[in-house]
Image (tube, rainbow, N blue to C red):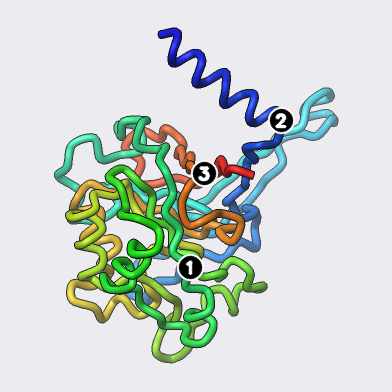
Amino acid sequence: MNQKVTVLSLLVEELRSGRVKVVDLTQPLGPDTPVIELPDMFAQSPGLTISQISKYDDNGPAWYWNTITLGEHTGTHFDAPVHWITGRERSSNTTDTIPVGQFVGPACVIDVSEEAAQFNDFILTREHVLAWEGENGKIQPGSWLLLRSDWSKRTGRDAFLNADEEGPHSPGFHPDCVRFLAHERDVLGVGVETVGTDAGQAGGFDPPFPAHNIMHGAGKLGLASLANLDQLPPTGAVVIAAPLKIVNGSGSPLRVIALVPS
């Protein structure tokens, strides 16, 4: 017990001194926040709407608060295993039943920002991950695998969703890479700066949408619409990504933070 207290006391001191900094990995959430768009035959997730309840007025003279309406997967958000049909039968697969220890883990950040800038449909492969491990060490079980694309730096809905007559174009993961990460590296899950964890063209992959299909089928998690991944080192940061405890929730907007050595 004393050792745990000492470790936590040391962390507090490192934070207080600035030797460990807190980095916000969350995009601002507002009515203009882009939401993933599905083909017309499917139901769409709404964007955020905010309605004022009171603001120091006759409806509430000393307090200000709002009603918000939004889909679970809006803005920077969390994907639980139950979000996908492959994860529906897993135990502890909803936002209120996932063990809280799975919300915290070391971060492995793979930087593909240059590749994604040159080719919007860039796909991360097993070989890319192995090359990264050759420089940074093997990905340890229980790590977050974060794909830095600098996509969060795009301004405006059209640039962020980046869709044309062929559908959206954004970077993501090859199915074999997802299998490798989920089953051979046993990651907590994957995180991306794009609107969803899959590549824009992943509907045509085998299987379709592997970052959802394979990851959630393995009981793994997803983080989408992250920001500021350029402030994280390849290894050494710890990410905390705790969703709202929504009963039977398939996901949740959340505030993702990273503890990073200065």
Label 2: few (<14), some (14–19) or many (≥20) C-alpha neighbours in 10 Å? few
Q: Secondary structure at mark 1?
A: strand
Tell which residue pokes out farthest to the left in this image. Answer: 89
The secondary structure type at the circle numbered 3 is loop
Q: Amino acid at mark 3?
A: Leu
Q: Position of residue 144 (x, y in %)?
A: 38, 49
Does residue 195 appear in this view?
no
Provide residue 71's location: percent of width, then percent of height: 47, 52
Residue 143 location in percent, x, y?
35, 46
Quadrant of the snapshot with the C terminus:
top right
The residue that label 1 is drawn on is 111
Snapshot quadrant of residue 55: top right
Question: Does label 1 or label 3 sit earlier along the sequence?
Answer: 1
Task: Give the label on residue 17, or none.
Answer: 2
Tell me how far mark 2 sits from mark 1, CA to CA: 29 Å
Residue at image location 82% in from the left, 23% down from the top: 62
